[in-house]
Amino acid sequence: MSLNLQRLAHVAFIADRFPHSNQLVQAVAGVNNNTIVVVNSVGPVILETILEQPNVQAIVWAGIAGQESGNGLVDILYGSTVPSGKLPYTIAKQTSDYGTSVQPGNDSYPEGLYIDYRHFDNAGIAPRYEFGYGLSYTTFAYSTLSATYTDKSAGNQTLAPGGISGLFDTVATVTAVITNNGTVAGAEVAQLYIGYPSSAPATPIRQLRGFQKISLAPGASGTVTFDVRRKDLSYWDVPTQTWITPTGLFNVWVGSSSRDLRLGGTM
């Protein structure tokens, strides 16, 4: 693998929490003007120093390495496979942007629901790469949003594993049309975010409530469908120890990431 990659670029591998990763990238990029950085990490890594290097042409976020990582990486770099992964967390510009830190002992979770992208949205902080972000060798257009809220009843109140059984009923459906308007086949992961009405207690601006991957040939279109459960539109009320569905209009967004919201509406 290394012999083939040398024809393309110098590749600097960064392991999670490697103490001198920035210096490694600087050393490699200092002698090669076509450097690709591959990050193997279980969580976010601050990338600002790496991004400042003019010879770093790309960053591949490879997650946790496995036995086929080498083959998979070559397939991505040479274009035989079109990437379609999305970040499961936010990559900030600086550590303090997360607004929290590891605490010893018991944790009372004072941040509540405002973790990761929900914290960044609430605090108005621009991330480096947002939750749900991911690039492709093609591009996708979003259109024709439809959001239908069909069942506003309280649902079946019979107790079941995980809560009352009605929580898991589909009560709304959201659809959108995705078009591959690029030149190669690829897959897009469309994401559904929901914002609660004003009748609910303080909640994040929007919360992920579904995602669907769709593979499309160049020029082709397809429909993604999100089945929304009653629980997805409810909140846990501590005083009454019950799930409550707030009344009013819910905001609906479908997009490519938590900050790249292509379509919006209400239901």
Image: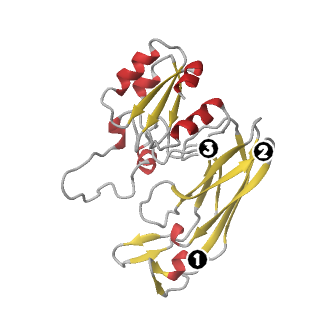
Q: Residue at x 61, y 43 (%)?
A: 84
| Quarter location, residue 72 | top right
Compared across the picture, whether 80 is left or right of 234 comes to right
> Looking at the image, which is closer to me, 60 or 81?
81
Tell me where residue 142 appears, x and y as whole percent: 71, 47
Amino acid identity at mark 2 = Ala
Q: Secondary structure at mark 3?
A: loop
Q: Disc 3 designates what residue?
A: 84
* Residue 168 position within the rendered picture, expressed as x and y whole percent measured from the top left: 54, 75
Image quadrant containing the N terminus = top right
Q: How many other residues sit within 10 Å of disc 3, few (<14), some (14-19) or many (≥20)?
A: some
Structural distance between the alpha carbons of marks 2 and 1: 34 Å
Q: Which residue is mark 1?
A: 169
Q: Residues within 10 Å of mark 2 (few under 14, many from 20)?
A: some
Which sits earlier in the primary sequence, circle 2 or circle 3? Answer: 3
Kindly report the distance in space between the C-alpha atoms of the residues bearing marks 3 and 1: 30 Å
- Helix, strand, or loop for circle 1? loop
Q: Label 3 is placed on what type of residue? A: Ser
Residue type marked 1: Asp
Q: Can you say whether 2 is above or below 30 in the image?
A: below
- Give the residue pinned by disc 2: 217
